[in-house]
Amino acid sequence: MIVFDDAYYMRRALNEALQAAEEGEVPVGAVAVHDGKIIARAWNQVEKLKDATAHAEIIALTQASAMLGDWRLEEVDLYVTKEPCAMCAGALVNCRLRRLIFGMADPRCGGAGSALNITGFPGMLHQVQVTSGVLEDECKELMQEFFKKVRQRPKKKI
């Protein structure tokens, strides 16, 4: 069996984030891994689906649960290009995710240790093991380029 490292899977998540950017979504991508195999891939689809909960993490968790036939993801690792928000971090705890690996931190809204520590809060029923900073520069660059283009777009007239 070939064993891949965190950077390999984060590059797959970056591919998903690129898809989001191409569709005008905030470029966050995620892949779920079980036994070394990618079992779910997702990107943000908030605008496309008109759904505030359609974050890459939530979509990937739903796909992973369907693939495994169980909501408990105790043997699943999730690779995400940006630190999950409070909603997504809560979902990671609730599904009992084994491990979260993310690229860039979100000091303003991150729920996995930056602004809040939902994934490691001692009062929760489960704590998620967290690794941060994997391909951080690439993840940040993609996000910064996206928002630079957003700021350059002409403003919509009301």
Image: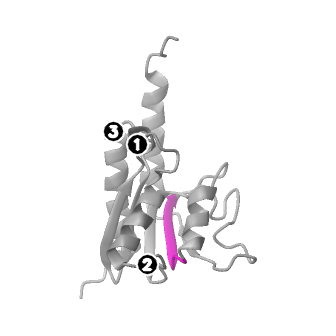
* Distance Cα–Cα, label 1 vs label 3: 12 Å
Q: Residue furthest bottom?
A: 1
- N-term-proximal mark, 2 vs 3: 3
Query: Is 34 on the left or on the right of 126, as rendered?
Result: left
- N-term-proximal mark, 1 vs 3: 3
**Which residue matches tag 1?**
49
Which of the 4 image quarters holds residue 93? bottom right
Q: Residues within 10 Å of mark 1 (few under 14, many from 20)?
A: few
* Distance Cα–Cα, label 2 vs label 1: 26 Å
User: CB of mark 1 within 8 Å of CB of mark 3?
Assistant: no
**Which residue matches tag 2?**
76
Q: Residue furthest right?
A: 123
Q: Main secondary structure of the magenta part?
A: strand
Vertical relation: 100 (above or below) 136: below
The residue located at (31%, 39%) in the rendering is 22
Q: Which of the pair 101/44 is nearer the observer?
A: 44
Measured as percent of width and height from the top left, residue 27 is found at 42, 46
